[in-house]
Image (cartoon, helix red, strand yellow):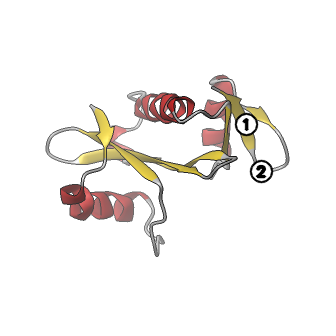
Amino acid sequence: MIRTLRPTDWPRYLDALRLIQPNLKSVSHSEVFVVDTGDRLAGTATLLFDGTRAQLDRLAVLPAQQGRCLSRELVDHVRRRARDLGFATIDADPIDERVAAMLRRMGFATTNTATLTGEL
């Protein structure tokens, strides 16, 4: 189940982020979405946006949960939310080539050396 992060989720959310991104120092977000498996938060994605630009950020899934299409579900959810907010495209700066390849398979195109853009 993918849902919006609730204030009561923060301890579990930060625990999951520390497992996924051990060097994480701070969390910056506009809207955070999580995959809730009931006993833990298995993945997360953040939608950053301002008046002109939407960006997919902090896409991460726990290693034990990878291979179950959770990243794809999170990306689809963030794209729908960005579309609902009135954006026509969304940018992403993938952290590695594996994530970049997945985003390209989902229709994102390279717009510069680091950024991929997808139509909504």
Residue 71 is left or right of residue 16, and the answer is right
* Amino acid at dot 2: Ala
Say which quarter of the image contains residue 54: top right
Q: Is residue 9 depicted above or below 88 in this figure?
A: below
Q: Where is residue 2? Give x, y as percent.
A: 32, 34
Viewer-proximal residue, 67 or 15?
15
Is residue 61 in view? no
Which secondary structure, mark 1?
Answer: strand
User: Which quarter of the figure is the N terminus placed in?
Assistant: top left
Is residue 29 in view? yes
* Amino acid at dot 1: Thr
Q: Residue furthest left?
A: 39
Say which quarter of the image contains residue 11: bottom left
Give the residue number, with chain letter if any, for mark 2: 114
The residue positioned 20% from the left and 48% from the top of the image is: 40
Q: Where is residue 91? Give x, y as percent.
A: 68, 42
The residue positioned 61% from the left and 31% from the top of the image is: 102
Which secondary structure, mark 2?
Answer: loop
Give the residue number, with chain letter if any, for mark 1: 117
User: Which quarter of the figure is the C terminus placed in?
Assistant: top right
